[in-house]
Amino acid sequence: MPSGTDTSASRRLQGIRRGAAFLLGLACLLVLVAMIALTCLDVVARYLFNSPVNGAYELTQLLLASLIFLALPLTTAAGEHIEVELLDGLKSKILKVFGAVCAGFATVAVFAIVSLELSEHAEKLQRREQVTDSLEIPLYLIGWLGTASFAISAIAAIFWTLRRWREKA
């Protein structure tokens, strides 16, 4: 009976992971399309009508930051970060596993710390009502998106570390 429960929980977790990956991927797609459309519209308006889109530079900056924050958990869950495998040349399987687990814990710790720091920064931005220069878009929105992104990435890094540990063990 416990194996049936484990399988059910595993399926549920896999479904949540797939759903989150789909939503994040869709959000990345929409942000990227918005960036492309905005850039094309700005170029056409600038050269044909001598009237650029107001705030296009600001919007592009915000959209780019959003794209990076939305893509980070996807990259982490797929294990596609750049890494240097210093211990792979070693013959000892125990040292390889130890190195992989240490790297995973370091990744989780860094993501968690950055998430906490970003949350403090986003809170300050919100309290001070900081906005962009020309369009007056609240900056705390990007701060909270970054906070959520790094928090989700920390959780994804935990699962990635466990998966790697099982593969190397």
Image (cartoon, grey):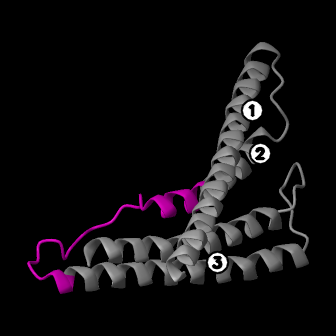
Which residue is drawn at the image coordinates 71% and 40% (left, top)?
A: 30
Residue 148 inside the magenta-drawn segment: no
Outermost residue toward the front in this view: 1
The reply to whether discs 3 and 1 touch (Cβ–Cβ < 8 Å) is no
Residue 112 point in image, percent of width and height: 58, 81
Residue 65 point in image, percent of width and height: 66, 55
Q: Work out whether residue 153 or residue 3 is closer to the camera in this orientation and state it.
A: 3
Depth check, mark 3 against mark 1: the one in front is 3
Which residue is drawn at the image coordinates 57% and 62% (left, top)?
A: 14
Depth check, mark 3 against mark 2: the one in front is 3
Give the magenta range: 70-95
Outermost residue toward the top in this view: 48
Residue 74 point in image, percent of width and height: 55, 57
- Relative to 87, is 26 above or below? above
- Relative to 145, is 100 above or below? below
According to the picture, the residue beneath numbered tag 1 turns out to be: 38
- Label of residue 115 in the image: 3
Bin the neighbour count of mark 3 within 10 Å (Cα to Cα): few under 14, some 14-19, many 20 and up: many
Residue 94 inside the magenta-drawn segment: yes
According to the picture, the residue beneath numbered tag 2 turns out to be: 59
Q: In the rendered image, which quarter contains the N terminus?
A: bottom right
